[in-house]
Amino acid sequence: MLTMLQQKNCLMRSTQSSAMFGGFLLLLCEIRFEHRAVVIDDWRPWIPIVFSGLMLIVIPLATWLWDGGGKRVLWACYCLTMCLGILGLVVHSEGHLIQRLSEIFSVWSSTLQDGAALKAHHPPLLAPAAFAGLGAIGLLFCLSEKSTSCAPPIADGA
């Protein structure tokens, strides 16, 4: 029988994994839609799409195998998620990160009419930050989670 603390930890781990699964599912859908035109001409836009799809497989498996190395697998995957998000920021900025950031934040200092008239001729700069942010949240989950087996103890045959 699992103790109350073990049950609480298992429920928390399942909840966190479900939240991460949902986050990657939403990102997968959104990124696939936003990259719909550029995937025709280039292979690089497929990277976050394929990675998100793989995470939908890895998260439940690694959660299930938490004490058998699953926690380490998720930790590595969430680190890679952050790296891909940062790489996406570089790619989406097209080499002009500071200029693109100033364009984004200029809407806050303009009137509503002037802000509405601004045209974006670039990929969405901060979209990859959501990818990096999801990886950071996953890392926090891995770092805060104590290693507690959720499997019920095996009873002796006596």
Image (cartoon, rainbow, N blue to C red):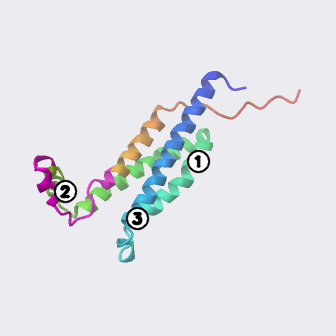
For label 2, the SS is helix
Query: Crowding near pointer 1: few (<14 within 10 Å), some, many (20+)?
Result: some
Q: Distance of mark 2 from mark 3, alpha carbons?
A: 24 Å
For label 1, the SS is helix
**Residue 127, magenta (yes or no):** yes
Mark 1 and mark 2 lie on one chain; the one further toward the N terminus is: 1
**Residue 121, magenta (yes or no):** yes
User: Closer to us: mark 3 or mark 1?
Assistant: 3
Q: Nearer the viewer, residue 77 or 105?
A: 105
Residue on which the image places disc 1? 60
Q: What amino acid type is highlighted by mark number 2?
A: Leu
Q: In the displayed structure, does residue 73 sit left or right of residue 68?
A: left
Q: Position of residue 142 (x, y in %)?
A: 48, 38
Q: Magenta part of the protein: which range?
A: 108-129
Mark 2 and mark 3 lie on one chain; the one further toward the N terminus is: 3
Q: Nearer the viewer, residue 24 or 30?
A: 30
Extreme residue in the front direction: 113
Residue depicted at x 18% and y 63%: 119
Residue depicted at x 50% and y 59%: 53
Residue depicted at x 36% and y 64%: 34
Residue depicted at x 20% and y 63%: 120
If the image is split into quadrants, where does the C terminus sit? top right
Q: Quadrant of residue 91?
A: bottom left
Give the answer, above or below, for where 133 lies relative to 152: below
Q: What amino acid type is highlighted by mark number 3?
A: Phe
- Where residue 118 is drawn, which disc sits there? none
